[in-house]
Image: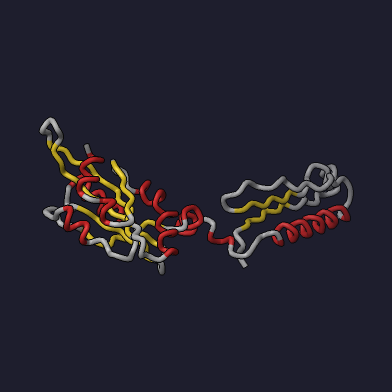
Amino acid sequence: MDHGWVVVARMPDARGAHGGDALGQTRPLLRTWRHGRSPPPIFRPPPCHTGLGNLASARAIATATTHRLLATVEPGCGNETNPSTMANSASGMVVNDECKLKFQDLKSKRSFRFITFKIDEHTQQVVVDRLGKPGDTYDDFTASMPDSECRYAVFDFDFTTDENCQKSKIFFISWSPDTSRVRSKMLYASSKDRFKRELDGIQLELQATDPSEMSMDIVKARAL
């Protein structure tokens, strides 16, 4: 079974009678290392100076040490370099690439007025749920949020300042209605910061448990 370890052993060579010490300058060397980890200390048995009996002894020591090292490998360590596994262990959730691509389209090309995202609990991924057309209104956005399911969303909000300047800001909205499942609320809450970091360009954030907490008045007040 491949445990993700690599073992390299160099055994002493027996030199001829006229080659000086039979084993004096050569020592057994056993190294082991594991993917992504620092190597343990190098195993160096005592130097051998005479005869082939010491060669057999060194081989026995190296073999026994190798077996002990391999016995410490826990099952399943072969996934350590799997990106999905690493992401799951770090945040519990993977962000589907489409989420980032669609967000970039909203931010740079203004291809969408809003995007809603959901967590697919079967695949353990954040995925795109719905795309709002450029001409959609804020009311269209709020109407797209389910009554009893959590969602993440981004909304490209256009507004006019007190100085009569046209501006826009991108809101990140975390929707967690009171009627949604407790497990779902916990999952969305624990994955939110990780997901937000994947969306470079968020300017403001709202958290809402009912529609009144993300009303147009609240959005305008935050934008200004």
Residue drawn at (26%, 61%) of the image:
145
Applied colour scheme: secondary structure
Residue drawn at (63%, 57%) of the image:
5
Q: Residue furthest front?
A: 212
Image quarter of the C terminus: top left
The foreground one among 96 and 93 is 93
Residue 70 falls in image quadrant: bottom right
x%, y% of residue 64?
79, 59
Left or right position of 119 against 131: right
x%, y% of residue 210?
30, 57
Q: Taking 183 as reference, is 112 above or below it?
A: above
Examine the rendering and report whether any part of residue 18 can be seen.
no
x%, y% of residue 76?
58, 64
Left or right position of 92 against 135: right
* Number of disc labels: 0
Residue 135 falls in image quadrant: bottom left
Q: Taking 120 as reference, is 62 above or below it?
A: above
Q: Residue furthest top?
A: 163
The foreground one among 120 and 22 is 120
Residue drawn at (79%, 42%) of the image:
25
Examine the rendering and report whether any part of residue 170 can be seen.
yes
Left or right position of 136 against 128: left
The foreground one among 2 and 30 is 2
x%, y% of residue 108?
20, 45
Residue drawn at (14%, 55%) of the image:
136
Image quarter of the N terminus: bottom right
